[in-house]
Image: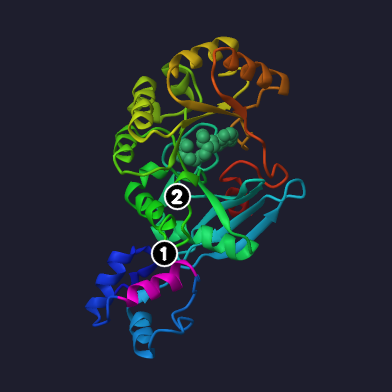
Amino acid sequence: MEKADIKSWNQTELKEFLVSLGEQPFRAKQVYSWLHVKHAETFEEMTDISKKLKDKLTNTCELAVLHKEKVQCSQVDGTRKYLFSLADGNMVESVLMHYRHGDSVCISSQVGCRMGCQFCASALGGLVRNLTPAEMLEQVYQIQKDSGRRVSHVVVMGMGEPLDNYGNLLKFIRMISDGNGLNISQRNLTISTCGIVPNIYHLAEEGLQVTLALSLHAPSQEKRLLLMPVAKKYGVIQVVEACRHYVQQTGRRITFEYSLVAGANDGEADARQLAGLIRGINCHVNLIPVNPVKGRGFVPPSRQATLNFKNKLEKYGINVTIRREMGQDIDGACGQLRRRFSER
Ligand code: SAH
């Protein structure tokens, strides 16, 4: 019999399971705390539950634990990049960034990705599989354990498309912000999507306070199609409309991510068109000079061209920042560490 993935259960599910084993309902809180606050890696460690229950759990449940394969530390800004292996041998990447406002962790939501964005390293091998809620949580738990500091912010911006793993993502959001778990404020969670329109509408109805980031990357349907195949299915007007709805429904300001590619989307006309496209939405634009990925041939604009683009957007009244590049000396763009590791 396959063992149950106990770390992916919320408290209600855990309670139902323990009651079905003949335990008192209050045990759920204890076990949940061992899993999600004390981060026990074995059932043996759970000192305040009976030997009988520990044995039952050992026989029926597995404890998803990620294994640290490799850690790279930036000499420049202290950013740490982690390569974790999962129980089935697959690997994912996560990143720890240290800011004045706290420690932020960037996690992966899938092994690989099927969205096929042209500039992205994670797209190169296609999708292998979705991550479970436990595997998403574990990236944060392991990093917190490793650094010895509390993680205050989580961004789902690593490998994978979070809205292509919707059910597990939702569970992850609710469990990481659960008062009986790590209790990270939903306002400190950011979900980055390439624009799966129906799931943006669903997310708007979940009663959450998370920040949505849309990877826009182009000011028109024509240009977006050249970079992001997802635009074939969900056009740029449709996706921006969905974002407008998300802001209205949740009251949360949205982030538009815009990777600047020299000669492709960084001209003055692009800036003007972009400003027109998102006009009237409570938003913030984050410019990211594209990170060159081996075999892709995309080049970032010069510093000056990047600044010109930013100034132009500001002139149109758009709130805009240029993403501070963290950990440039350690395989910057997402998916690069995993690829380099598997090439060896
Ligand atoms: N699938 C999600 C999250 C993963 S990527 C999404 O599409 O948003 C996180 C961000 O990094 C996205 O905005 C993505 O488009 C961007 N990105 C990926 N590869 C990049 C590269 N080589 N240079 C710059 N940005 C990149």
Tell me the quadrant of the picture where the C terminus can be found. Answer: bottom right
Q: What stretch is highlighted in magenta?
A: 26-37
> What predominant SS class does the magenta segment belong to?
helix
Query: Which residue is disc 2 drawn over?
Result: 109
User: How many marks on residues?
Assistant: 2
Q: Is residue 20 above or below residue 284?
A: below
Q: Percent x, y for residue 293?
A: 61, 37
Q: Is residue 123 visible?
A: no
Q: Is 129 placed left or right of 309 in the picture?
A: left
In whole angstroms, how far apart are the C-alphas of marks 2 and 1? 23 Å
Query: Which residue is disc 1 drawn over?
Result: 180
Instruction: Based on the picture, tell me whether residue 15 belongs to the magenta stretch.
Output: no
Q: Earlier in the sequence, mark 2 or mark 1?
A: 2
Q: Do the residues labelled 2 and 1 touch (CB within 8 Å)?
A: no
Q: Mark 1: which secondary structure?
A: loop
Ligand 1 within 8 Å of the CB at mark 2? yes
Name the image quarter holding residue 18.
bottom left
Name the image quarter holding residue 8.
bottom left
Closest to the camera, between mark 2 and mark 1, is 1
Q: Percent x, y for residue 316?
A: 55, 12
Q: Is 163 placed left or right of 260 in the picture?
A: left
Q: For the point 38% across and 88% down, which residue is it? A: 50
- Mark 2 surroundings within 10 Å by alpha-carbon count, few (fewer than 14), some (14 through 19), many (20 or more): many
Task: Name the residue nearer the viewer: 226 or 197.
Answer: 197
Task: Name the residue nearer the viewer: 50 or 101.
Answer: 101
Q: For the point 56% across and 46% down, which residue is it? A: 335
Q: Percent x, y for residue 130?
A: 39, 52
Disc 2 marks a residue whose amino acid type is Ser
Tell me the quadrant of the picture where the N terminus can be found. Answer: bottom left
Disc 1 marks a residue whose amino acid type is Asn
Instruction: Based on the picture, tell me whether residue 33 belongs to the magenta stretch.
Output: yes
Q: Is 63 placed left or right of 12 in the picture?
A: right
